[in-house]
Amino acid sequence: MKFNTKTIHGGQKPDAAYGSVMPPIYQTSTYAQSTPGGHKGYEYSRTHNPTRTALENAFASLENGKYGLAFSSGLAAIDAILKLLKPGDEVVSTNDLYGGTYRLFTKIYEDFGIKFHFTGMENAKRIEDNINENTKLIWVETPTNPMLNIIDIVSVAKIAKRYEVLLAVDNTFATPYLQQPLELGADIVMHSATKYLGGHSDLVMGALIVKDKDLAARLYFIQNACGAVCGPQDAFLALRGIKTLHIRMQRHCENGHAVAEYLAQHPKIENVYWPGFQNHPNHDIAKSQMKAYGGMVSFTTKGNNYEEAIKIVENLKIFTLAESLGGVESLAGHPASMTHASIPKEEREKIGVVDSLIRLSVGIEDEADLIADLKQAID
Ligand code: P1T
């Protein structure tokens, strides 16, 4: 089945009871048993729920995986991966990543005895410099949030295999429409399904997808034992969102391209970060592992003035100033004071998250309106 068909049918079939084309919202915590243990595959909704199962099957299908797991948020999904580890284990992570992931690593899991090494992964050699006998996990986000760096998943996967370390890829920015990390050698794909998978800014959710049966069993155990599952209403909304993922992504990419080109020629703009540009430092890798370049664009203004950046985001009318990304509507954010405020100033500035950096999640509105809005806000 091709991707554009999978978004609509992947892992899903009409409901067995009445043939409803969309899975019903099984709004129930529990299921009747005829005798203890005598049930129809469902006994308690933390463990399983039929609406969630339909969504988990859809996740697995989209990423060419075998097993999908849905969580109450993206961070809950990452938390489940970290629970595969034990005190003394070490993780090598990208140094440019979502601030909340960084906070979970450094403010929660370091206290439980896990050590994190943050490094730029554009050069794979740097990963090897941080691997030792305690390393159990490599954490990759690509494209990175918010600098839009691209990491070569195939090269990192080779290193992970050589050292027998798990490779997890946060595929939130790309979505399986643009890249499928399991096909490139990753062991675990993670999503904040809050973003493009849901696609309508109406839910908070996380996803994990794997191919390996034993790894899936360990993650299902953690999901049930720790309990950060999503509810059936949200599972239904995510299923509905996924059905248009391919057409939404196509438009996000087109509009992202137009906005990036507009910003690049604007005299007040210093840098535009978008992996589709030929002069983006990792453009060749983006070209080889992604189908197109996505709808996320970051930029800085000349002079790197904090007040000016704040004024621009306040002046926007069609772009909404808000955290998050990946919905049909365009959003603008100021990473240094919003999504990445939990990263110390000197750390974030090392990776380019300077005071004038503005991050755009370019939506699927009319391209001309988006450009006119940026023009009036910047001018
Ligand atoms: O918000 P939540 O569903 O828990 O997902 C966390 C998360 C994980 N990974 C990436 C790449 C993310 O971008 C996020 C959430 N990011 C935002 C809220 C944001 O505005 O960047």
Image (cartoon, rainbow, N blue to C red):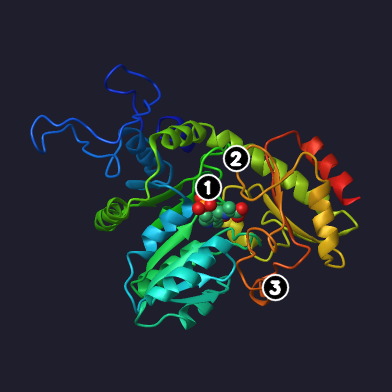
Dividing the picture into quarters, in which one does residue 318 lie? top right
User: Mark 1 or 3, which is nearer the eye?
Assistant: 3
Residue 349: numbered disc: 3
Q: Is residue 113 above or below residue 331?
A: below
Q: Nearer the viewer, residue 49 or 268?
A: 49
Residue at the (61%, 40%) spot, across then down = 327
Whichever of callouts 1 and 3 sits on the residue coming sooner in the sequence is: 1
Separation (CA) of disc 1 from disc 3:
27 Å
Q: Is residue 32 above or below residue 61?
A: above
Residue 324: numbered disc: none
Residue 175: numbered disc: 1
Q: Are marks 1 and 2 in contact (CB under 8 Å)?
A: yes
Residue at the (35%, 38%) spot, across then down = 52
User: Mark 2 or 3, which is nearer the eye?
Assistant: 3
Whichever of callouts 1 and 2 sits on the residue coming sooner in the sequence is: 1
Q: Are marks 1 and 3 in contact (CB under 8 Å)?
A: no
Q: Quadrant of the N terminus?
A: top left
On the image, the x and y values in percent for residue 270 come to: 83, 63
Q: Is residue 153 visible in the rendered structure shown here?
A: yes
354 horizontally vs 244: left or right: right
Residue 249: numbered disc: 2
Separation (CA) of disc 2 from disc 3:
30 Å
On the image, the x and y values in percent for residue 107 come to: 49, 71
Amino acid type shown at disc 1: Thr
The residue furthest front is: 29
Q: Secondary structure at mark 1?
A: helix
Q: Secondary structure at mark 2?
A: helix
Q: Is residue 186 visible in the rendered structure shown here?
A: no
How many residues crowd mark 2 within 10 Å: few (<14), some (14–19), many (20+)? many
Amino acid type shown at disc 2: Met
